[in-house]
Image: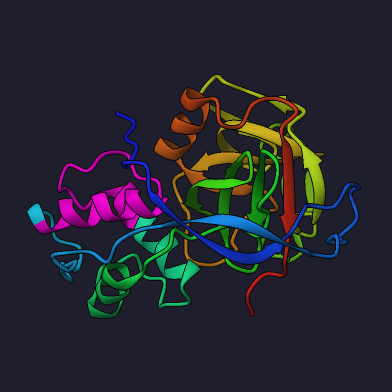
Amino acid sequence: MTTTAAPPTTTTTTTTTTLPPTTTTTTTLPPTTTTTTLPAVPVADPAIQAVGSNSGEATRAAQWRLLELGFWLQEPDGSYGLTTRQAVMAFQKYYGLTADGVLGDETAAKMSSVTTRPTASADAGTLVEVDKSKQLLFFIIDGTTEWILNTSTGSEIPYREPDQNTPGEWQEGDSVTRTGLHSVYRQRNEGWWEGDLGSIYRPKYFTGGIAVHGSNHIPNYPASHGCVRVSVPAMDWIWASEIMPMDIPVWVHGSIPG
């Protein structure tokens, strides 16, 4: 089941507009000052409770709050499952908290007190943004950040591993998620399949062999061979919602933590 939070109210402020680069370089266009409308949200009332990883009505309230703030999860059903943990981790990453996926006191307090929806760096156009510094995936539609997912990008640790499809051959690489402006140019809808470096789920390729794809392991740090990992339910949602169609721009920027 796909859920969508109620539309936020708005408030007007002066900010900068950041566009993705127009080439595959790592350059960001200089910001220009303009007046934009930033989405506002009320303080949570009652406050979000620190439920840890427990399920229940307090968890359901936290799930609705995460959806209201733009952090995607599968369903506000009160169950502290995979996509809730991933949404909490994404929230923690965005606000610089300890990204353990557990709704503790500090996370609950921050979740209760924020008054604007989080935004991507890009605030113009329709695109997918991969922020390597935050380890987050943003979906921007007509300049508005609609949804945010937890992700794990390339570890940037060189590898040499057996080819999973060709016995006796080896795969080598640098595990880097390439920065720059790319676009989705190839995709596979048929569930799990064996790539040369292991199993991947419903990938959408945006540069070479690098794709956004579903995975069973999306930790709080960069861990992939270069791809952009999301949870399997999140990848199913990406396909079902058609939020990442062929040819959509994919802007990768930043440097991995540490």
Q: Residue 229, how many percent across, how many down?
A: 56, 48
Camera-nearest residue between 37 and 81 = 37
Say if 207 sits above or below 188 in the image: below
Say if 238 sits above or below 215 in the image: above
Q: Quadrant of residue 26?
A: bottom right
User: Which colour scheme appears in the figure?
Assistant: rainbow
Left or right of residue 85, residue 36 in this image = right
Camera-nearest residue between 54 and 77 = 77
Q: Residue 23, how many percent across, how many down?
A: 91, 47
Please identify the quadrant where the C terminus is shown: bottom right
Magenta span covers which residues?
58-85
Camera-nearest residue between 56 and 34 = 34
Query: Residue reaching furthest top?
Result: 190
Give the residue displayed 56% in from the left and 31% down from the top: 243
Q: Quadrant of residue 69?
A: bottom left
Q: Can residue 153 be spotted in the picture?
A: no
Left or right of residue 89, residue 199 in this image = right
Q: Is residue 146 magenta?
A: no
Query: Residue reaching furthest left?
Result: 57
Give the residue displayed 63% in from the left and 45% down from the top: 143
Q: Is residue 61 magenta?
A: yes
Give the residue displayed 48% in from the left and 68% down from the top: 93
Q: Can residue 240 be spotted in the picture?
A: yes
